[in-house]
Image (tube, helix red, strand yellow):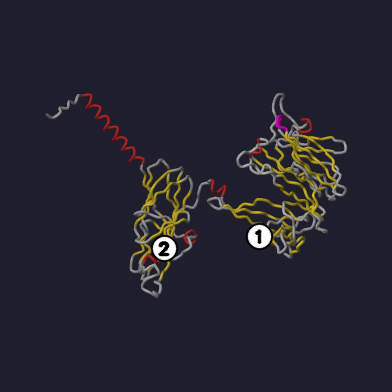
Amino acid sequence: MFPVFKFGYSNIFLMKRNIFILSTLCACCTLFAEEIPVRQFRYAGPYEIKNPFLVDSLDVNSKKFTDAELLKTAIPFRNVRESGRMLGADASVGQTGTSSVSLVSFYLNSDRYTEGTLQVSGPEHYEVYLDDEKQVLANGELKLTLEPRRYEVVIKYLTVSGKTNQLPKVLFKTSGQAVVSATTDPEKRYTLSDVFDGTRFRSVSLSPNGKYLLTAYQTTYPGGATESFQQVTDRATGQVLLESDSHFYSWMPRSNRLYYTRKGMQGKELVTIDPATQTESVLVSNLPGGWFSFAPTEDFLLFNVAEEGPKKGEDLQEILVPDDRQPGWRTRSFIHKYDLATGVFQRLTYGHTSTSVNDISADGRYLLFTCSERELTKRPFSTTLLYRMDLQTGETELLLKDPFISYAQFSPDGKMLAIAASGEAFNKIGLKIAPGQTSNMGDGQLFLYDPASKQAKPVTRDFNPAVQRFVWNKGDKQIYLQGEDKDCVRLYS
């Protein structure tokens, strides 16, 4: 017997309703699908291409010569970018007696992330490039995932001898809700690529006499790769006197010369160079390793030399303090002095705690340096010790012990100190907050300190921007500082 199916009114109603909903969904999908035809191209060409002389009938891979080989002719894309010739999608360039290669370009702009398909038809032999990258099409189609930015599409196509040079037919299909346009207008929206990619200056410094400018640049390429270079220019004329991407230049403290290090026959060489004549002089032919800075008197160098601590065990590791979990925490650095006249390399600090150079007095006699002691049970969990060393006698004096100071610089006459710290330094004299509030240690402040009277003055207590860096100029005796003011960085004096 065959089964008997009974359909009630309610079942028929439900079936019709489901069919209606399915039809509506299909209609919506069709409604949101969008086709964007390319109606205009920027055109360059045609470039006449002659067949090469066939030395042999087959190449090294046993392939015969075909017209497709002519498409491999290199034509710079700047030709089409700089071209002012615009052609409609239905235009024909004409017919020539020889084969030719042409370039057409347009831009795809999307207002949001979306997926779609680029369809190309027409020429028998063509290549498609997206932002200078050659693409591989399958049956004339290219799947694309667009970000909210501008894309340049360049199509290089071949017209063989005797054929009409007909422009390609291009269509972009998307099923998303993005607004996508195809245009020859090069205008584009500002994107993250404009923020990160390109060439920008990283630092600028004047020569001691103010005549020359040393500027460091960095070029960031799409994808994140970077290259750096420096230029020395005449500040009055703007003429580039020197450029290098292999050496890192810095100005000497007094003389208007640059210095850098390089590998020499006897070791690391310290070299000075005159930017005006580009003549070089080797100051040291076997320089010790480590980071160094010139003394203001240019007769000695101060080095920070790293020393590795004991290695951790492989089977069982001892963690001395929480920061001991970080790579390199057990490495310490200590200050050494290198005399340029005699070559004597003398150690100035020794111990378990790293020491850091802060400043050297203008006469080259005194050194300011800091180290820190850990206090894991008390905020900010370490205390900074500021020392002044007499480089002639070796006598060293502890000037300050404060958990909230960062670093210090001498005044031009060496009698006062400018100290970068948070507002809680010097028994909180720099604070300007309501009772019960906790200060922000990232709000940098500047203090003037007199070592003779041991008195400090909070010079930026009523100054809103956070002090980031400063310098006490020896020329006009003014302090110039870089301050962070909300989302801006400004220069103050």
Tally of marks: 2
Q: Mark 2 points at which residue?
A: 102
The residue shown at (45%, 43%) is: 113
Q: Residue at x 34, y 39 (%)?
A: 29
Q: Which amino acid does label 2 sit on?
A: Ser
Q: Does the magenta stretch include residue 376?
A: yes
Q: Toward which corner of the image does residue 371 lie, by quadrant?
A: top right
Q: Which amino acid does label 1 sit on?
A: Ser
342 and 175: which is toward the camera: 342
Q: Give the range drawn in magenta.
A: 375-379
The answer to the question of whether label 2 and label 1 lie on touching residues, with beta carbons closer than 8 A, is: no
Q: Does the magenta stretch include residue 354?
A: no
Residue 289: x %, y % from top left: 72, 54
Residue 334 picture location, percent across and down: 75, 46
Could you tell me which quadrant the N terminus lies in?
A: top left
Q: Is the magenta stretch mostly helix, strand or loop?
A: loop
On-image quarter of the C terminus: top right
* 281 or 411, nearer to the observer: 281
In the structure shown, which secondary structural element does the residue marked by tag 1 occupy?
strand
**Side of 124 where 484 appears, left or right:** right
Q: Position of residue 451 (x, y in %)?
A: 85, 39
At mark 2, the secondary structure is strand
Q: Residue furthest left?
A: 1
Mark 2 Cα within 10 Å, few/some/many (few <14, many 20+)? many
Residue to which mark 1 is pinned = 244
Near-viewer residue (337 or 452): 337
Give the answer, above or below, for where 454 lies relative to 4.
below
Q: Which of marks 2 and 1 is nearer the N terminus?
A: 2
Rounded to the nearest angstrom, the CA distance separating label 2 from label 1 is 39 Å
Classify 66 as above or below 154: below
